[in-house]
Image: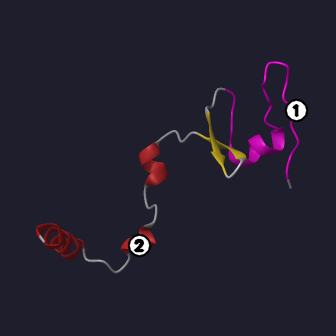
Amino acid sequence: MASRVKVSSKNQIAVPADVRKQLGIQRGDVLLVEVRDGYAILMPEPRDYSKRLRGLHREIWQDVEPQECVRQEREAWQG
């Protein structure tokens, strides 16, 4: 369920307590703001980007032999 917030006279919003709890947001944390298809998306900035990205899209590389993949790429570039 969506939470409602009001923009203050200083163009600020307060993140509701239930949202902070669900996302693990604490005082002093930094949030990233992204606009997607007309919506503002707020998300906590990862404390460690490498940990956050580790394993991302691993299904793409499932059953792929790394050396064979590199060999094929090299051949493709050589024309």
- Residue shown at 69%/28% (left/top)? 27
- Residue shown at 24%/71% (left/top)? 66
Specify which label sits upstream in the sequence, 1 or 2.
1
Boundaries of the magenta span: 2-27
Is residue 2 placed above or below 63 in the rendered structure?
above
Nearer-the-camera pick, 48 or 35: 35
Q: Which mark is residue 26?
A: none
Is residue 74 placed above or below 22 in the rendered structure?
below
* Residue 25: quarter of image: top right
Q: How many residues crowd around disc 1 within 10 Å: few (fewer than 14), some, or many (20 or more)?
A: few
- Residue shown at 78%/24% (left/top)? 11
Q: Amino acid at mark 2?
A: Ile
Find disc 1 in the rendering and name its residue. 6
In percent of width and height, residue 15 lies at 78, 36
Q: Which mark is residue 60?
A: 2
Is residue 47 placed above or below 72 in the rendered structure?
above
Is residue 19 placed above or below 28 in the rendered structure?
below
Magenta-span inclusion, residue 45: no
* Element class at badge 1: loop
* Element class at badge 2: helix
Magenta-span inclusion, residue 6: yes
